[in-house]
Image (cartoon, rainbow, N blue to C red):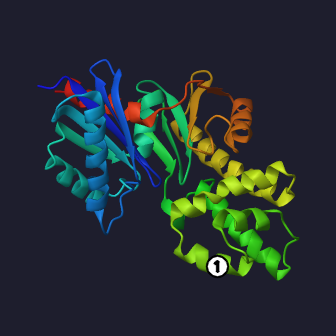
Amino acid sequence: MSRTVAGVDGGGSRTRAAVFDLRLHPLGRAEGSDSAIHPANPGASASVVAAVVRAAAREARVALPLAALHVGLAGAGRPGPRDEVSRILEGEGLATRITVGSDAEIAFHDVFPTGPGILVLAGTGSMVLGRGHEGGVERVGGWGPLMGDEGSGYDIGRNALRLIARSEDGREPRTDLRAIVLSRTGLSQATDLAAWAASAGRPQVAALAEAVAVAEEVGDPAAAAILDEAAGELLRQTESLVDRLGPWEGPIPMAFVGGLLGPGGPLRSRVEAALVRQGALPREQVVDPVRGAGRMALGTLLQG
């Protein structure tokens, strides 16, 4: 049997995979296009995952099948599409044991493999996962773009587009966001943004969060207000989960992941400072979801 495992982190913008030995030392890594599960075409997600795992195995100079593979995918919260991805991958000869779960879950298991803790995630989407002292893992958020994703990149980008529309109508003052967003989208007129937004996917809208951060840096108060609102939404989700998982014994271990909350992210200082005031103890380690997926793959071997 192979003495290697692999983990995959598949999101709406890219897919990353790594092959590990049984001590979780990385042997090879690879990256590919997005592999978020689209319910109408789960096979597309499986194809990207299979290609990236094979590339990581070549980099690691190990033969397939591996001993175990765990795949964390955006959109894997729905059992039907998730099971279909798992079924397809099992026919690809990638690993003897294959499991599929959410992308948030693998990030959580990287920083909190055991014990209590809370992970706040804000990238294209948003979610808060936590484990209390009694051991159960629960979540708040993760409802997707129609019902949730408050405080996410998509939420920030959508609010930026709405602000520009109101500004064009004269319902809001002029904002520096207009010129910055037009530059990022390659458009010349704000009226063209409606057609762009209608055809853009979630990652493209979420990428506008960077434009909002740039506008805040040049002193745009409307951009700062959008980011303040997003931080407030993440804080409310976190506070809800803290209450549900309590009581806590001492400071609450907490970690952050996603482009908005990673080191230097536009929401990191806002959210972290507020949670520290409320009793959080932030973890300094950088969260690696791929390593978390590898850890979960290894766990399937240890469970027999």
Q: Is residue 206 left or right of residue 133?
A: right
Residue 255 placement: quadrant? top right
Q: Tag 1: residue type?
A: Ala
Residue 217 location, x and y as percent?
Answer: 81, 48
Which image quarter is the C terminus in?
top left
Residue 284 placement: quadrant? top right
Identified at 70% across, 48% down, the residue is 231
Residue 278 location, x and y as percent?
Answer: 71, 33
Mark 1: few/some/many CA within 10 Å (<14, 14-19, 20+):
few
Which image quarter is the N terminus in?
top left
Q: Secondary structure at mark 1?
A: helix
Residue 26 appears in the figure: yes
Q: Nearer the viewer, residue 250 or 233?
A: 233
Disc 1 target residue:
194
Identified at 21% across, 28% down, the residue is 62
Residue 262 location, x and y as percent?
Answer: 61, 37
